[in-house]
Amino acid sequence: MLRRAVAAEARRRISLAPARLAHELAHPQAESVVPERRGLEPSWVPLYKRISKVSHGRPPGIVAAEMDEWLRQRLRLSQDQVLAYVRELTKFKKNEGALELLDWMEAHGAKLRLGHHALRLDLISKVRGIQAAEKYFWSLPDICNSVKTYSCLLNCYGKHGLAYKGLELYEKMKAKNIVPDKLVYNNLMVLYQKAGQPEKILSTFEEMRGSGVSANKFTYFTLIESYITMNDLDAAEKVLAELQKVAPVHWSLYTRMANNYIKLKLFGKAEIALKKAEEVMDKADLRSWYALLSLHAHCGNSTEVKRIWKSLKSTFKKCLSRSYLVMLQALSMIDDFESLQQIFQEWQSSHEHYDTRIANVMIKAYLDKGMIDEAEAIRQSTMAQGHCDEGMVYIFAEFYLDKSDVNTALEILRDANNMVTTHKWVPSKELVSRFLKHYEESKDVAGAESFLECLKKFECLDPDAYEAMMQTYVVAVPALMKMNVSCSSMPVGISEKTAKEAEDNVLPREM
C-alpha cells in the first residue's frame, strides 16, 4: 500500500528536467532568461487549449484543477511543457493563468530558476499588486535575490509609479554590492524619468558606460527622451545619430522627434524626421501610418497627408473606420473642407460598422462653417440608425450655447436620453455650469427651473446645482421687485417661501 501511494505521488509530480524555455520579462528592454523554443509541440496543444479557456476571468484554482486532472489521467507532462504554457499565456496577457501555473509548478516540486522567479515576481505585481510582489521578493532566499529579480522589482516600481521606492531599492543593491547589469541601468533610467529627474538619466548613462555595460536601443531611446524633456534637441540629435550607427532606429523615435520639432515650429526638421520614420516603419503597423497622418497635418502639409493616405489605402486591402477617422481628423486640422467631405462620403458608402466619432468630426466641421442644416442632417441620420453618443450631444449643446441660443441647447439636452443609447449618461459638470451661468447672467428664473427639471430626469441634480439656482433667484428678485411683481405673480415654479428667501438675501431689513 505504501509503495503504491509513493508511486501515485510520484506520478502527480511533473518532470524536473531542466527548463529550455524562455520567458521575457514584461518590459521593452528585457532579454531572454534561457534559450527560447518557439511555439508549442503538437502533443502539448490539447492541454494548452483546455487551460487557455479557463485562465482568464475565472475563480482561482481552475487552471490548477485542469492540470491535476491531466496528471490523474497519467498523461505525460514536463516542466518544459508547463513553461511553454506560461509563455503563451503571458503573450496573450492571460496573466492570472500564467501565475497560477507557476504556483502549481512549485507546489508539485519544480525548482524555479532565477529567471523564473523574476517572471513570477512580475506576474504577481500585475495580478495581485505591488505589495504582494514586494512580499514575494523579500521572501526569496538570498541565492534567488539576484540582479535579475532586483531588476524586475525595479521595473515593477516603475510601472506602478513608485519611483522613490525603486530608487531606495537601488541603494540597497549598492549596499549589497550587487553589480548592475543592462536591465538594472535601463530600469533605473526609467525610474528617474518617472520621478521627473531627467538630468540623472544622463549621469546614469555615463555610469553605465564607465562600468563597461553596453547600451541597447531602449537605453538610447530613454536617453533621447530625457534630452527632449529638457528641451535640448541638439543633444537629442547627437544621440540619435550615434544610435543610427549601432542599431536600427524604431520609427516611433523619429515621430517623437518630429512632434517636438513641431512644438518649436521647426516644420522643416519635422518633415525630415517623418521621412525617416516612413523609411524604417513596419508597413503592416497601422499605428505608424496614423502617426504620420497626424504629424504631417500638424505641420500643415496637405500634400503629404494625402500622399500618406493614398499609400495607406494601397497597402491594406480593407480600410478600417479607424483609418478614416484619423484621416478626417487630419483634414479637419488643416481645414481642407472639400477633401473632408469627399472622404466622409467615401466612408459612408463603404463602412460595415457605424462609427459615431467619424460623424462627429463631420458635424463639427459643418458647424464651424455655419452649415447647421447639413450638421443636423447627419445627426438625424445617425439617430435613425441608433448610433448617437454623448460626444454628439456636447458638440451641438456647446455650439448653441456659444451662440447664446440656450433654448435650443436645452432641447438638445432633453433629447439626450433618446440619443445616447449605449449606456446611462449624464451631462458633465462643466456643461451644467455653462447652462446655470447663462441663466444667472440673464436673470432667467423660469429657464433655470426648466433646466433643473431636466437634470432631475437625468438623476444628476446635486447641491451645487441647487446653490446656483438660488444665486439666480438672488440676482433675479430685485429686478422683479422693481417691476412691482409680487411673489404670487412670479413665474410658475417659484414658491412664495423660495422667493422670500431670495428677497431676504438681497433686500435690507428694516430696523
Image (tube, rainbow, N blue to C red):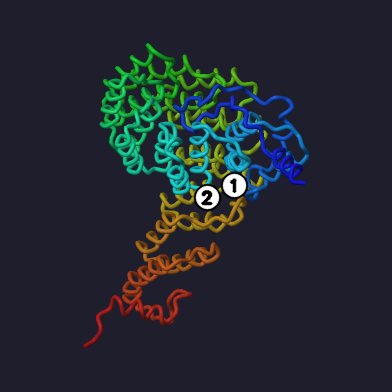
Q: Residue at x 53, y 49 (%)?
A: 390
Distance, label 1 to label 2, CA atoms, is: 8 Å
| Residue 178 drawn at (x, y percent) | 35, 31
Residue 186: image quadrant is top left
**Label 1: how many Cα within 10 Å (few below 14, some 14–19, many 20+):** many
Marks 1/2 in contact by CB < 8 Å: the verdict is yes
Q: Which of marks 2 and 1 precedes in the sequence? A: 1
| Residue 341 drawn at (x, y percent) | 54, 30
Q: Residue at x 35, y 38 (%)?
A: 194
User: Does 67 sit above or below residue 204?
Assistant: below
Identity of the residue furthest to the left in this view: 511
Q: Residue at x 45, y 66 (%)?
A: 462
**Label 2: how many Cα within 10 Å (few below 14, some 14–19, many 20+):** many
User: Does 367 sit above or below residue 260?
Assistant: below
**Would residue 229 appear left or right of 98 to someone viewing this image?**
left
Residue 445 in view here: yes
User: Does 418 sit above or below residue 235?
Assistant: below
Identity of the residue furthest to the front in this view: 2
Describe the element under mark 1 as helix, strand or loop. loop
In the image, 354 versus 137, the foreground residue is 137
Q: Disc 2 residue type?
A: Val
| Residue 429 drawn at (x, y percent) | 43, 57
Describe the element under mark 2 as helix, strand or loop. helix
Q: Give the total number of marks visible in the rendering.
A: 2
Q: Which numbered circle lies on residue 388?
A: 1
Q: Residue at x 67, y 38 (%)?
A: 13
Residue 269: image quadrant is top left
